[in-house]
Image (cartoon, grey):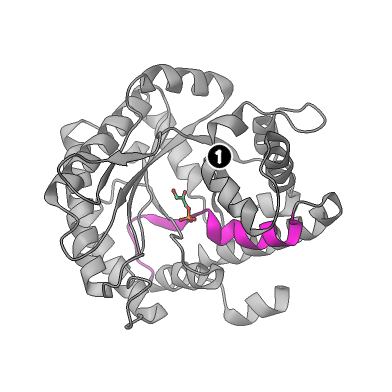
Amino acid sequence: MNLPDLNKVAVAMVTPGKGILAADESTGTIKKRFDAINVESTDETRRDYREMLFRSAEAMNYISGVILYDETIWQNAKDGTPLIRLIEQAGSIPGIKVDEGTQPLPFCPGETVTVGLDRLADRLTKYYAHGARFAKWRAVIDIAADIPSATAVHVNAHALARYAALCQAAHIVPIVEPEVLMDGDHDIDRCFEVTRHVLDEVFRELRLQRVALEGMILKPNMVVAGKKSPKQASVDEVAHKTIRLLKECVPAAVPGIAFLSGGQSDEEATAHLDAMNRIGQLPWKLTFSYGRALQAAPQKAWSGKAENVPAGQRAFTHRAHMNGLASLGQWTAQLERKAA
Ligand code: 13P
């Protein structure tokens, strides 16, 4: 492992003012997003849509890295340029999602484990040769009355660390993503407790499996109430509880934390990130690695029509800019309105 090189990439991924675009929806997930805007999901429409994003020159000024799905990393733009080259030409780092989704976890009803470790070493070698410099693996932890079980937390943390070690051995920076879902009716304090259990287990496994923390990025959920909870927390409470938790659980050797948006509205995701960066005096850089909170607006503006590409790019630029400001603690609701 060349740790100085891995660290350089990890630090670049969390450059102040920039963050990560998660454009790695699997074929099934992007179909759901396209269904919502009445666009048929074909390899061509998926290509056109992602080409629109990667050619948004202004937006890409705020994007340090792009997470791709396997199909996209091998696809060419309409003019034959590989999509991965468009990302590099925009000054951004290409990355690749390498997990193969979730499977039911035996004897743990309602819980899953993320799979994809078999043959991962070979796949990483091929992705590196093609230009990927970081990867992503997402573990999913759900909250309900009797879950998560210690079993689900443990096996998912173990797999995340196995993946992270394989990445670093292949000169690829792992994004370690343990996502505690916000789908339930739990309050913010239950999210705090469960996320603490998960992060403790993840860092224990990373240490046990000799992962170098300087050469990775953590992608956690924020500490929020479940969507169905009658008691939603304020921006200030989310920011303070998330920072308190991360300070307890995430060693200062980790260069950066890039949050997932997880179903928050576009503006909530931006406001929360901004409020956390305004707290200041943090041992790591804090930025975004958003999928939905960056793409919902451009998807709607584009709606599958070539003549809407400039509108789609404007919408993407706006969200990328607002989140870039949030990564500096310089976003305001007024700027959000003014620039929109
Ligand atoms: P969301 O921001 O839509 O949660 O997606 C981020 C991601 O990459 C989930 O794995």
Residue 327 x/y as whole percent? 50, 62
Residue 142 x/y as whole percent? 28, 57
Q: Is residue 205 above or below residue 60?
A: above
Q: Amino acid at mark 1?
A: Thr
CA neighbours of label 1 inside 10 A, class few (<14), some (14 to 19), many (20+): some
Q: Is residue 313 above or below residue 97?
A: below
Q: Is residue 81 above or below residue 300?
A: above
Q: Is the N terminus in the top left, top right, bottom left or bottom right quadrant?
A: top left
Q: Is residue 297 above or below residue 24?
A: below
Magenta range:
280-303
Q: Quadrant of residue 82?
A: top right
Residue 62 visible in the shown view: no
The secondary structure type at the circle numbered 1 is: helix
Q: What residue do we see at 28% from left, 72% from top?
A: 241
285 magenta-colored: yes
Residue 269 x/y as whole percent? 49, 67
Between 151 and 168, which is closer to the camera in this rendering? 151
Q: Is residue 149 left or right of residue 290?
A: left
Mark 1 C-beta to ligand 1 under 8 Å: no
Q: Is the C terminus in the top left, top right, bottom left or bottom right quadrant?
A: bottom right
Residue 175 visible in the shown view: yes
Q: Quadrant of residue 184?
A: bottom left
Between 231 and 215, which is closer to the camera in this rendering? 231
Q: Is residue 10 left or right of residue 145?
A: right
Residue 278 x/y as whole percent? 43, 73
Q: Is residue 208 left or right of residue 172?
A: left
Between 180 and 272, which is closer to the camera in this rendering? 180
Q: What residue do we see at 41% from left, 55% from top?
A: 285
326 magenta-colored: no
Q: What residue do we see at 60% from left, 50% from top?
A: 63
The residue pinned by badge 1 equals 27
